[in-house]
Image (tube, rainbow, N blue to C red):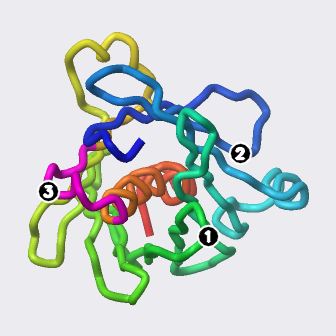
């Protein structure tokens, strides 16, 4: 999965489900690379019918096309500022996200496992366009619902978006994992809590 630099993420349509599942495709070849799926305990699934999702913990498991775990995104319950951890296939922490307080344009901070800021995810007030930037302003990736080409007709849902990772990260699987995890977290964790604003 991490060999690709451009991904298309499409939410599966599931009726009366409290969890979300996404298919992940290679943008260039249209080949399905894997899935991203929320894994919730029975108690949390029940509580989601009555409580805000942001109050409850969640885990998103990303698997490749052979069903092997690539990484996980895990968030505990929170009320004001979320901390979302990214774990590798061996459940080792490789980084985490921290939501911004009082952000109108949306976004969050990205840190590595040693608490060093790796990037910032910046959004805009309108639409679904985000950039992943280094502390120096260099673009590491972007997430957008605007695309063209062969997949334009296939992917028409509002819950489908493209993730582009900088070619500079092609040989850095951990960095690429953090960028892809950040892109998934925008929709699966942050954006779904409150459509229209993050953090």
Mark nearest the camera among 2 and 3 is: 3
148 on left or right of 31: left
Q: Helix, strand or loop at disc 1?
A: loop
Report the magenta residues as a range: 164-174
- Which residue is at a point 56% across and 74% down the rendered structure image? 92
90 on left or right of 96: right
Q: Residues within 10 Å of mark 1 (few under 14, many from 20)?
A: few
Q: Where residue 190 appears, x then y in whole percent?
A: 50, 59
Q: Is there CB contact under 8 Å for labels 2 and 3?
A: no
Q: Residues within 10 Å of mark 2 (few under 14, many from 20)?
A: some
Quadrant (top left/top right/bottom left/bottom right) for the C terminus = bottom left
Q: Is there CB contact under 8 Å for labels 2 and 1?
A: no
Q: Is residue 49 visible?
A: yes
- How many dots with numbers? 3
Mark nearest the camera among 2 and 1 is: 1
The residue that label 3 is drawn on is 168
Q: Nearer the viewer, residue 7 or 77?
A: 7
Q: Nearer the viewer, residue 153 or 54?
A: 153
The residue that label 2 is drawn on is 19
The residue that label 1 is drawn on is 91
Q: Helix, strand or loop at disc 2?
A: loop
Q: Give the CA distance from mark 2 to mark 3.
A: 34 Å
Picture layout, residue 151 above or below residue 166: above
198 on left or right of 189: left
Q: Where residue 161 appears, x then y in whole percent?
A: 37, 35
- Which residue is at a point 89% across and 55% down the rendered structure image? 42
Question: Hey, which quadrant is residue 29 in on the image?
Answer: top left
């Amino acid at each position: 999965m991490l060999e690709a630099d451009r991904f298309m993420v499409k939410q599966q349509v599931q009726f009366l489900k409290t969890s979300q599942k996404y298919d992940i495709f290679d943008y260039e070849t249209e080949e399905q690379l894997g899935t991203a799926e929320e894994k919730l305990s029975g108690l949390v699934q029940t509580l989601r019918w009555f409580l805000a999702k942001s109050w409850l913990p969640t885990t998103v498991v990303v698997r490749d096309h052979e069903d092997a775990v690539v990484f996980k995104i895990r968030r505990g319950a929170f009320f004001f500022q979320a901390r979302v951890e990214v774990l590798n296939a061996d459940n080792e922490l490789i980084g985490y996200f921290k939501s911004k307080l009082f952000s109108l344009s949306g976004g969050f901070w990205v840190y590595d496992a040693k608490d060093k800021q790796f990037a910032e995810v910046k959004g805009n007030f309108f639409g679904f366009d985000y950039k992943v930037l280094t502390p120096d302003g260099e673009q590491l990736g972007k997430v957008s619902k605007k695309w063209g080409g062969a997949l334009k007709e296939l992917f028409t849902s509002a819950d489908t978006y493209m993730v582009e990772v900088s070619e500079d990260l092609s040989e850095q699987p951990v960095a690429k994992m953090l960028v892809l995890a950040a892109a998934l977290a925008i929709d699966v964790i942050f954006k779904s809590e409150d459509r229209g604003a993050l953090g």
